[in-house]
Image (cartoon, grey):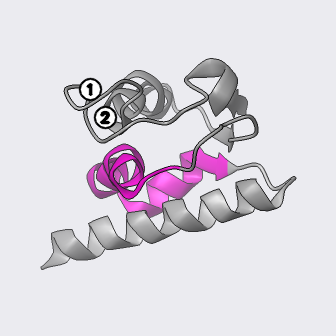
Amino acid sequence: MKHYNFANEYAAVPGPRNEDIGPNSGKKFREKVLRPLFESNTEIEIDISGTTLSFGPSFLSEAFGELAVEKGKDRFYQIIHFKHDSLKNIKFQHLVEKYVDLAINKKRR
């Protein structure tokens, strides 16, 4: 399993949905980080320690929700895991789960 510290390896400040709106976007994170891990079948444990701003709904929806729709929820959670050493990381996991569920439910309609 790959340990991934978001602040150190991607950005301390998560961005918007797309790069044309601002840097460190959810789409870029999905394409540059998450998708390659899925393609290599590598599990990842995400740690958001060190991030200085909270993750916005557009980032979470674009990075995690879209990938879960594409790959399937079960497969998504086989690859994506979350560090549980702090309340911040646990809250992040709950937010990701919320936006994954929203994206999947939206697709079903």
Identify the element where label 2 is drawn: helix
Instruction: Point out residue 70 in the picture as x, y percentages from the top left corner.
Output: 27, 50
Callouts 2 and 1 close, C-beta under 8 Å: yes
10 relative to 18, above or below: above
Instruction: Point out residue 11 in the picture as x, y percentages from the top left corner.
Output: 56, 25
**Quarter of image, res 29:** top left
25 relative to 83, above or below: above
**Quarter of image, res 30:** top left
The residue labelled by disc 1 is 19
Residue occupying image coordinates x 12% and y 79% = 109
88 relative to 39, above or below: below
Residue occupying image coordinates x 38% and y 58% = 57
Residue furthest right as drawn: 85
Residue toward you, 15 or 101: 15
Amino acid tagged 1: Glu
Residue occupying image coordinates x 43% and y 52% = 56
Residue 60 - label: none
- Magenta stretch, main secondary structure, is helix
79 relative to 108, above or below: above
Does the stretch in magenta take in 79?
yes
The magenta region covers: 55-81
Residue 27 - label: 2
The answer to whether 104 appears left or right of 2 in the picture is left
| Comparing labels 2 and 1, the label whose residue is closer to the camera | 1
CA separation in Å, label 2 and label 1: 8 Å
